[in-house]
Image (spheres, grey):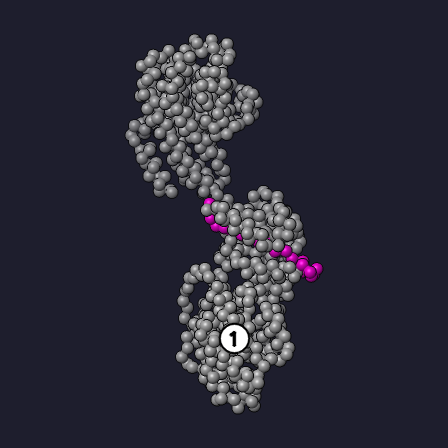
Amino acid sequence: MQQQVVKKERRMFSSSDDNAIMKQVVGTHSPDGREVLLEPILNVIEETLQRAVPASIDGVINGTHSAPIDALAGEEKPVFASFEDVDGIPDGLASVIHKIACEFSCKCSGGSDAHASALAILNMLSNYTWEAKFVISLGAFAVNFGEFWLVAQLFATNPLAKSVALLKQLPNIIEHYKSLKPRFDAINILIKAMLDVTKCIIAFKNLPYQYLQDDTPPKSTALTHIPTAIYWSIKSMVACASQLTSLLGMNYEYITATSEAWELSSLAHKVHNIHEHLKGLLLLCMQNIEEKQHDEYYLMLVRIFDVSHIDNLKILKALFCAKDDIHPLLDGSTKTRVNVDVLRRKTVLLLISDLDISHEEILVLTQIYKNSRTQPDLNYEVVWVPVVDNLTAWNDLSQHKLEQLQSMMTWHMLHHPSMLEPAVIKYIKQVWHFEKKPILVPLDPQGKVTSANALHMVWIWGNVAYPFTSMKEDALWKEESWTLEFLVDNIDRYILRWIAEDKYICLYGGDDLEWIRKFTKIATDLARATGIPLEMVYVGKSGTKERIRKISTTISEEKLSHTWPDPTSVWYFWTRLESMLHSKIHQGKSVENDPIMKEVMTMMSFDGGDKGWALICKGSSDMARANADLAYSSLAEYGNWEGDAQENGFVPALNAYLAQNQTPHHCTRLILPGVSGEIPDVVVCSECGQTMEKFFMFRCCTD
């Protein structure tokens, strides 16, 4: 955008004629430091010009005229009774405006040179700032323009206006209005362009100086072009005033002439281009200022999180109340807007995600949150923080998606993604490492972050992990061991009952239906032949919901084994394994020094395979596991280790046979869903202990 503005600038301001003219214009400038409050005056000017333009000429003729509210300004504004009602206008300014109005009327009536008239006006205003010159000149023009149309609008109903109109021959103008309409339209377009330039120049004046000084680009570039913009605008006022004056006492030939309208259109094009150029520079300035304000806010967040507080309100307000909305949150249970005060001195879990958070994540977290409500000692609240980078692309579909997700949640949530300051989003991404996958950042009752991402411990232990601190996570791992109860948790209560009944249990997974049929048959036949009480459960595969649902349906229809009919259970099983891995990585563990991590890595390596895998256990901790081919072949070759099974037990004998038949040739794949800062540089194979090669995979799975 900066390059486009520079190219446009060269085309617009590089002519030698313009350069010579601008030397004369700048030579008239001799400010004495006086300041004028311009915005109130501009409001009166804009209202004057807006109300002056008739909605239709028929209304003027029959006396029913009413000014359109959108002819120039686009909206109705309050009426000011007099200049005295507007604060900040110094004494004597009305006199200056009157003198400039006379300059417009007198000089323009004699067909004088527009350039000379513009310079004369600038000389009369030499002691004022550039912005004040512009507004005062536009005010003087508004007086003339307003008086012209005031008489025209009232002459049909007001005797005094009718007399003045006759003296000015305004009835002739009204009579030939249709012929003059192109000229009036051109005047209105030019006035609109001048108003746009005025607002733009005042906007430059009001830019906060602490963020962007006058000698700093792109503001410095704009300031060098403001005199040019003001000159051409005043010259355009002269041209408009000349048109109005020349209409008095005109003849038919003048009425039908088109050159005047062409001249006005040419000026409007010039002024419009100047406005577009200045608007582009203003946008660059505002972007520059916004970036500095965002950086300032970001540093404030860094500081505020580094110090201690008596409660969490200061932190929460810094995160959610920058927009001055006193009710930035939505209560999920009542769907009413609430203040952050409802979270005061509570442990707050910030659930941070985009709008692609899965329904499974919401459903499981809802169950955990619901269970916490029945335990008074669990004093925590969840707040969903939806992060949307590009709000300019927000549409009805985005809004529907947001509302659909909000309807599923029973906890607190940010009312709308627009409530987040860009600096807050930057902090969330740079400090809390949020990218795509949801994270859960816990704040203690004083607003202190107690874990980089507590979502993993919530998936693993649920409410047992309260208050969701890193110390609590370490303590829980010290108490944990690799058992079937830990692996399946409360996902399947039948498995917990089978463990208590001392049954043999086989968990298996994968998406190769032919292997599943073969494996379940050999396992069932072997169990029947040996008298082993075996229960088999299909636990699916991560990331392929629809395919796994179809396979589960087939398994149930063919009565091959038990399945988990709810896809959420399959998702939760694999998500817990991923969470175990991420939690261990965050603790700095590896397969060499942590047996649980070794088992988790093995399970996830199985999941990355092409066919499947199986885990067989008796009780809780006596386990044997293998990939698809080895699991099948070992059961098929039961006769080779039957004696060992009868002497030492089925699972120990199977483990020994698997170890003997472990082929040196294997291809193990471990797919780690990316979470920033939690992917280790080195991962060793869980089967052979060698360092695995690293590949990058980008996946879009709509299944």
- Magenta stretch: give its range: 373-392
Is 376 one of the magenta-colored residues?
Answer: yes
- The quadrant of the rendering that contains the N terminus is top left
The residue depicted at 47 percent of the width and 10 percent of the height is: 162
Name the one closer to the observer, 393 or 444: 393
Name the one closer to the observer, 146 or 1: 146
Q: In x, y percent, where is residue 28?
A: 39, 24
**Rendered view: 307 above or below 646:** above
Q: In x, y percent, where is residue 375?
A: 69, 61
Q: Is residue 627 visible?
A: no
The residue depicted at 46 percent of the width and 23 percent of the height is: 55
Q: Which residue is mark 1?
A: 560
The residue depicted at 52 percent of the width and 75 percent of the height is: 560
Name the one closer to the observer, 596 or 37: 596
Is 484 one of the magenta-colored residues?
Answer: no
Q: Residues within 10 Å of mark 1 (few under 14, many from 20)?
A: many
Report the side of 47 relative to 243 (left or right): right
Q: In x, y percent, where is residue 702?
A: 45, 59
> Element type at marker 1?
loop
The residue depicted at 42 percent of the width and 13 percent of the height is: 170
**Rendered view: 499 above or below 475:** below
Q: In x, y percent, where is residue 113?
A: 33, 18
Looking at numbered disc 1 in the image, what kind of residue is underneath it?
Leu
Report the side of 334 relative to 220 (left or right): right
Residue 235's quadrant in the figure? top left
